[in-house]
Image (tube, rainbow, N blue to C red):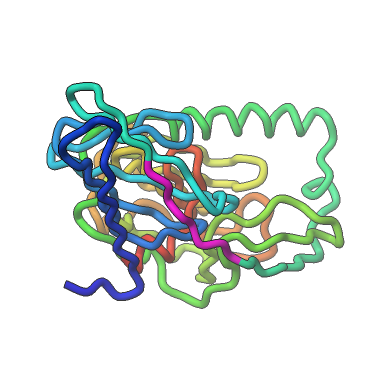
Amino acid sequence: MRYRGLLILAFMLLGHGMSTALALEWKGQAIQGGLLTGYVDSGANVEALGQSISVMEDGRFLLGLGREAPAELDVVVIKPNGDRQNYLLSIEQRDYDIQRIDGLPDSQVTPDEQTLQRIRAEAARVRAAREQRFDTPFFDTGWIWPVTGPITGVYGSQRILNGQPRQPHYGIDIAAATGTPVKAPADGVVTLVEPDLFFSGGTLIVDHGHGLSSSFLHLASIDVELGQRVQRGDTIATVGATGRVTGAHLDWRMNWFDQRIDPTLVLNQ
């Protein structure tokens, strides 16, 4: 079977003193911002990026590659008998756009100390939401766009705000009118409901299982509750212009735990 735009990688390496080969197979695009599905023998464990990765009963696991993922990444497969095998994953590097945004209030570009304290507290709540673990692969339902409209901002772009370099953009900006319904792109569980964060305004996070989550920013309203199970296509919120914005749009972001990944790469696989 062919997978358009996908790279299938298979590794068959002999371990030291072992009579059989350990196999690791990848489906997906091994590129900065990408999401890979790995396949190992049932009962094996996997380690990468300094953490133990949850393996599903059928041997699948997810691995998210952040914006700055290195050209090579070590992945360790541990068999049920304790044998370990190291694999080297080659990751395609990307060139990112530069996006200039002017006309923002100075207080939103260079916040004062009191505001910085608020921002740090809000960031801690967002991190805690993304650290929750659900072993159900809700993402198996497949993916849809949460909103349709012109793409006005892309993943990974270096942002220049009022002439000052700031953090890269980690989402996809989709232009839409205030009040446009936002749909759940896949099944999941609501792990964060925040009506008024400093930078992102109305903010919602849906966990899709095994560390994979979607964040929806600048919302006018949120139509779901913390802990609620949602299905792909459910209306979960409406587009707004809250937080640090210059106009109404949806900023859709995806994470694999703390790795920020590109939603368009997930949709295309």
Of 240 and 174, which appears nearest the observer? 174
Question: Whole-percent x and y of residue 57?
Answer: 14, 36
Q: Quadrant of the N terminus?
A: bottom left
The relative height of residue 181 versus residue 14 in the rendered view (above or below) is below
Question: Whole-percent x and y of residue 247?
Answer: 64, 66
Label count reads 0
Q: Residue at x 33, y 30 (%)?
A: 133
**Which quadrant of the view contains residue 249?**
bottom right
Q: Quadrant of the C terminus?
A: bottom left
Asked whether the viewer can see residue 181, the reply is no
Question: Whole-percent x and y of residue 66?
Answer: 52, 49
**Which quadrant of the view contains residue 213?**
top left
Q: Residue at x 42, y 29 (%)?
A: 51
The relative height of residue 112 versus residue 187 in the rendered view (above or below) is above
Q: Residue furthest top?
A: 82
The relative height of residue 261 versus residue 40 in the rendered view (above or below) is below
Of 205 and 13, which appears nearest the observer? 13
Side of 20 relative to 55 (left or right): left
Side of 73 relative to 21 (left or right): right
Q: Is residue 174 magenta?
A: no
Q: Residue at x 51, y 50 (%)?
A: 72
Q: Is residue 89 magenta?
A: yes
Question: Whole-percent x and y of residue 97?
Answer: 67, 69
Q: Which residues are magenta?
A: 87-94
Q: Residue at x 53, y 46 (%)?
A: 202
Side of 20 relative to 28 (left or right): left
Of 178 and 122, which appears nearest the observer? 122
